[in-house]
């Protein structure tokens, strides 16, 4: 068994695809419209779906925003240059909500950003 994907709902699909592609360096792997259900799915990741976990962005055509709730935590992405990752997020309309530095009670260097819909993304320096 393995994780296939994580799905998040987004209000503006084009904005989200651009953010995940440009700011986070993911590749758009596939995209499919479902007119009968009035939604579109887009899958992005760092490798093909056959061997890596990816993110599924779900855009319901009649919904422009969502309440994020308090159950979802964050996506975690390993990065070699955490400062550069934070700068790319800023350049592409995201916000860095915790600057790079060691995690509390540890030495691992982390940072947190938010995508345009407010989802948290943790960068972990490798």
Image (tube, rainbow, N blue to C red):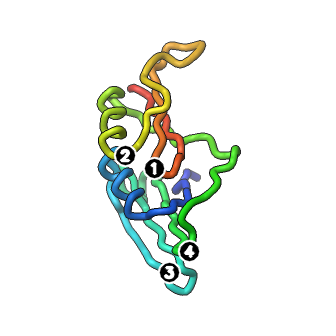
Residue 33 position, x and y percent, is 45, 78
Compare marks 3 and 4 and give the one earlier in the sequence: 3
Residue 94 position, x and y percent, is 41, 43
Snapshot quadrant of residue 77: top left
**In the image, farthest residue toward the bottom:** 36
Circle on res. 116: 1
Compare marks 2 and 4 and give the one earlier in the sequence: 4
Indicate the secondary structure of the residue bearing disc 1.
loop
What residue is drawn where x is 48% and y is 69%?
41
Viewer-nearest residue: 97 or 122:
97
Indicate the secondary structure of the residue bearing disc 3.
strand
Compare marks 1 and 4 and give the one earlier in the sequence: 4
Task: Assess whether mark 1 and mark 2 are in contact (beta carbons under 8 angstroms).
Answer: yes
Eyeballing the image, is 104 above or below 113?
A: above
CA–CA distance in space, label 2 to label 3:
28 Å
Within 10 Å of the Cα at label 2, are there few (<14), some (14-19), or many (20+) other Cα atoms?
Answer: some
Circle on res. 34: 3
Within 10 Å of the Cα at label 4, are there few (<14), some (14-19), or many (20+) other Cα atoms?
Answer: few
Residue 67 position, x and y percent, is 64, 54
Viewer-nearest residue: 49 or 67:
67
Residue for badge 4 = 62
Indicate the secondary structure of the residue bearing disc 4.
loop
Residue for badge 2 = 93
Indicate the secondary structure of the residue bearing disc 2.
loop
CA–CA distance in space, label 2 to label 4:
23 Å
């Amino acid at each position: 068994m393995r994780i296939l994907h994580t799905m998040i709902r987004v209000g503006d699909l084009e904005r989200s695809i651009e953010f995940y592609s440009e700011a986070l360096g993911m590749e758009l792997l596939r995209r499919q419209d479902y007119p009968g259900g009035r939604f579109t799915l887009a899958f992005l990741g760092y490798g093909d779906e056959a061997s890596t976990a990816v993110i599924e962005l779900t855009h319901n055509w009649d919904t422009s925003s969502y309440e994020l709730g308090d159950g979802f935590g964050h996506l975690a992405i390993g990065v070699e240059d955490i400062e550069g990752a934070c700068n790319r997020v800023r350049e592409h309309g995201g916000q860095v909500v915790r600057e790079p530095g060691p995690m509390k009670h540890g030495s691992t260097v982390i940072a947190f950003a938010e995508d345009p819909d407010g989802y948290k993304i943790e960068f972990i320096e490798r």
